[in-house]
């Protein structure tokens, strides 16, 4: 275990070689999110967004010592009573995560519940650990979920899957989630590190500017808030970029391109 994860704390940020890792770090509480943790996450997101060298953000959890791995047990509902918090405040976490500049990967190394499921959905890509489960108990608690969370569920799960999640509150198995296309990979603990490292490496090998601009366009298309002029502008920006010139030369020379992000 790394030194910064030796004791329970708010989420921990580590940045190295263009990759930021945020680790939920309250394993004894099944990584439940308290209001202070949410504020820390927002601060970490801001740090990552401002660091132009960061191209990939990995969100994971410390599951050491847990009988069964739990990525996150969800939002501490006791926090609803704190002034200025509750569902509206929680909503800012996945909403902010979904719009970050770097490619975001949720390394879902444990089961996930409640509002934390929307944090997982807000990431661009996900890898999952075999044997985990997923449950959205909002209606079992008497709550109508917030709009952006419902939109993400319908977008990622499809309407049938979203209805199952919210209108039955039944858990999903990892295999069910994988069948719906939620994961880039569903792997064993033995395969975990290599699978995550390869996914990160594949993203880092791409042209940074093209990835960044394409992510914006895909998000806009998914939300129905896109216009052709903006997408064309991004297309033209990348077609005139040094990276595209390098990509064409590298393809002709049958070598790996060396991108510079402009």
Image (cartoon, rainbow, N blue to C red):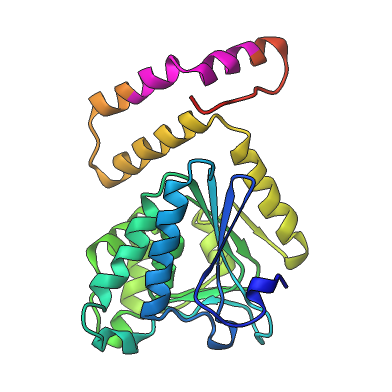
Q: Predominant secondary structure in magenta?
A: helix
Q: 131 left or right of 176?
A: right
Q: Name the residue rendered at 64%, 83% in the picture.
A: 68
Rendered location of residue 197, percent (x, y):
69, 50
Rendered location of residue 246, percent (x, y):
59, 16
In reply to whether residue 202 is colored magenta, the answer given is no
Q: 243 left or right of 87?
A: right
Q: Name the residue rendered at 58%, 32% in the picture.
A: 206
Q: 122 left or right of 92?
A: right
In reply to whether residue 236 is colored magenta, the answer given is yes
Q: Is residue 158 visible?
A: no
For this rendering, which residue is in front, 251 or 44?
A: 44
Query: On the image, which quarter does residue 43 sit in?
Result: bottom left
Rendered location of residue 136, percent (x, y):
39, 75
Q: 87 left or right of 253?
A: left
Rendered location of residue 48, percent (x, y):
47, 52
Q: Residue furthest right?
A: 190
Instruction: Locate the N terminus and report the quarter of the image it occupies.
Output: bottom right
For this rendering, which residue is in front, 143 or 13?
A: 13
Please give the range of residues in magenta: 234-249
Q: Name the residue rendered at 66%, 9% in the picture.
A: 252
For this rendering, which residue is in front, 162 or 70?
A: 70
């Amino acid at each position: 275990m790394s030194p910064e994860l030796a004791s329970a704390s708010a989420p921990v940020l580590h940045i190295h070689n263009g990759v930021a890792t945020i680790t939920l770090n309250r394993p004894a509480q099944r990584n439940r999110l308290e209001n202070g943790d949410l504020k820390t996450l927002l601060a970490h997101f801001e740090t990552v967004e401002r660091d132009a060298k960061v191209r990939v953000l990995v969100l994971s959890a410390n599951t050491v010592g847990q009988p069964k791995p739990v990525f996150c047990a969800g939002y501490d509902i006791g926090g609803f009573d704190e002034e200025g918090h509750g569902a509206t405040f929680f909503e800012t976490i996945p909403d902010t995560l979904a719009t970050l500049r770097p490619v975001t990967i949720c390394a879902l190394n444990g089961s996930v519940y409640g509002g934390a499921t929307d944090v997982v959905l807000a990431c661009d890509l996900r890898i999952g650990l075999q044997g985990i489960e997923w449950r959205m108990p909002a209606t079992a608690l008497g709550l109508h979920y917030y709009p952006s969370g419902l939109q993400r569920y319908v977008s990622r799960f499809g309407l049938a899957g979203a209805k199952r999640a919210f209108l039955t509150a039944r858990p999903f198995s990892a295999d069910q989630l994988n069948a719906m296309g939620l994961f880039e990979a569903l792997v064993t603990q033995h395969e975990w590190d290599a699978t995550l490292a390869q996914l990160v490496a594949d993203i880092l090998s791409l042209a940074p500017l093209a990835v960044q601009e394409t992510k914006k366009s895909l998000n806009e298309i998914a939300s129905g808030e896109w216009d052709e002029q903006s997408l064309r502008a991004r297309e033209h920006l990348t077609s005139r970029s040094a990276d595209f010139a390098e990509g064409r030369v590298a393809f002709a020379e049958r070598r790996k391109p060396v991108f510079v992000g402009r």
